[in-house]
Amino acid sequence: MTTQFNRTAIYISLGLSIALVFGVIFGAKFVFENTAKAPVAISPIKSDFADSPQCSGAVDALPSDFMGHPRAEVAEPVPAGVAAWASTSTDEVTLRCGVDLPLQYTSYSQPQDIDGSRWLEVSDMTPGSTLTTWYNTDHFPTLAVTTFDDARPSGLDSALDKLDSRSPSPAPAPLSQLAAGPDAMCGELEDNLPDSVADGYQRRTDINEKNTFVWSAPGREEIVVRCGIASPENYRAGVQLQQVNDVPWFEDTTLGEGTTAGTWFALGRADDLALHAPQDVAGSALVRLSDVLSAHTPAQEA
């Protein structure tokens, strides 16, 4: 028995299938391109110098392509001193001029050199976020570039030339404003501090501050330890303490306003000690420091 095929029907079906495939491809391309060209929403924030002549000049001097992305339209209402670049709705780069430097920018910070200018990297620590903001630290008003990854903002020389070449003053360094106290145990403590007190944080040795020790991580606030301080002003008998191994710690929540870090005071040792650390790595720092304190510093005399 011979099966007969209707060649015309087959050709029509094949043609329809090919047309459908091309329709899907071109439809996807149309959606992709229009999504990529959709205006980028930039919310207004406190930017006292955003409408300054310097910022206007900087925005006018921005490149049409930046960090591998074409210039994008900003959604209305457009805040002063902003710009955006985007390849897709998720691959966006935004720029603001005239913003305040974050409180994380202190004399302990380590800005990175990019094209001969200094930039502070600040990672967004919101769970699941990959955003990174780079703040320029040697021009005023301040430029801030937010990326969807940790790529460096290279190629802004012309815009920076429109700004004043001066560095805004950094915020007070963590723990630097605490009053000094006895420091008999601090030398022994320094000799036994670990190279790392949390994942990614490495010990720095270039802090010219007595009894102060700093660990740094890219895009993160520093972890700072200061030994030999006066008793914490806000500590009161009966307040809840956090016992870590053999060391009781008092958390002073009033000292962490405006940052993602907290401040803890080690009690019960011969001298008082303070720790400044981001909340998500403070647990690790408290454990490792408690081990060092227990092993290498004397307990407070009764």
Image (cartoon, rainbow, N blue to C red):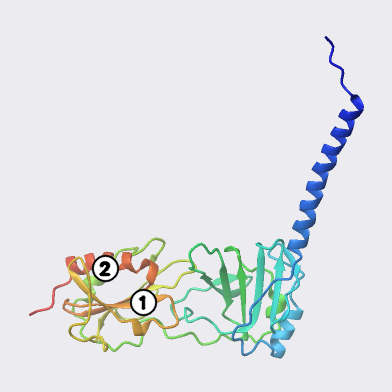
**Mark 1 packing: few (<14 Cα in 10 Å), some, or many (20+)?**
many
Q: Amino acid at mark 2?
A: Leu
Q: Residue 23 at x, y = what percent?
A: 82, 47
Q: Quadrant of the C terminus?
A: bottom left
**Looking at this view, is 127 or 233 the one in front?**
127
Label 2 SS: helix
Q: Secondary structure at mark 1?
A: strand
Looking at the picture, tell me which residue is in the foreground, 278 or 291: 278
Query: In the image, residue 131 lies at what x, y percent?
Result: 56, 67
Answer yes or no: do the residues labelled 2 and 1 have beta carbons within 8 Å?
no
Residue located beneath label 1 in the image:
262
Q: Residue at x 40, y 74 (%)?
A: 206
Q: Residue at x 42, y 86 (%)?
A: 172
User: In this rendering, would 14 be left or right of 275?
Assistant: right
Disc 1 marks a residue whose amino acid type is Gly
Which quarter of the figure has residue 62? bottom right
Please tell me how many numbered marks the rendered image carries: 2
Left or right: residue 64 compared with residue 221: right
Q: Which residue is mark 2?
A: 289
Q: Earlier in the sequence, mark 2 or mark 1?
A: 1
Give the residue furthest to the top: 1
The relative height of residue 170 versus residue 294 in the rendered view (above or below) is below
